[in-house]
Amino acid sequence: MNGQDHPSHSVHLLNVGKVRIKLCRGWITKAREIYSTSMQLCGVRTDGNAAAKQLFWQPRRGISFVLTFESERERNAAIMLARKYALDCNVSLAGPDDQV
């Protein structure tokens, strides 16, 4: 989170909704943001096998998360669904190095 490594062995839930994305651990909400132009969402681009399962999410400036999914398919589905819902809200979700 925010460039610092905070390993978590608990299960977190990334809820991709039609108007917002929410990250929860049990009943605790870590982040909840509506789709906006300042939000960034993309797959992690590093070497290694773990990168294929990781997602970078920056809901707003000053807070960012790197989430690891159980499979590459789950990660890609979350990215595609979030980008589809964001486009419905007239927002284009991209990563920090993406050309929009």
Image (cartoon, rainbow, N blue to C red):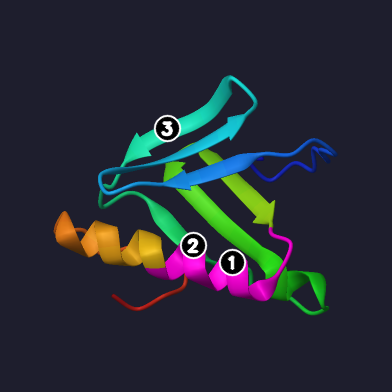
Question: Mark 3, residues whose alpha carbon is within 10 Å: few (<14), some, or many (≥20)?
Answer: some
- Nearest-to-viewer mark from 3 and 2: 2
What stretch of residues is rendered in magenta? 69-80
The residue type indicated by label 1 comes to Arg
Residue 75 falls inside the magenta stretch? yes
Q: Quadrant of residue 8?
A: top right
Quarter containing the C terminus: bottom left
Q: Is residue 87 above or below residue 10?
A: below
Q: Is residue 1 above or below residue 82?
A: above
Q: How far apart, in angstroms, are the residues tagged by discs 3 and 2?
A: 15 Å
Q: Quick one: label 3 or label 1, which is nearer the N terminus?
A: 3
The residue type indicated by label 2 comes to Ala
Picture residue at 74% right of the left edge, 62% below the top? 70
Residue on which disc 1 sits: 75
Q: Is residue 87 above or below residue 21?
A: below
Residue on which disc 2 sits: 78
Tell me if label 3 and label 2 are in contact, CB under 8 Å: no
Q: Quick one: label 3 or label 2, which is nearer the N terminus?
A: 3
- Can you tell which mark lies on residue 32? 3
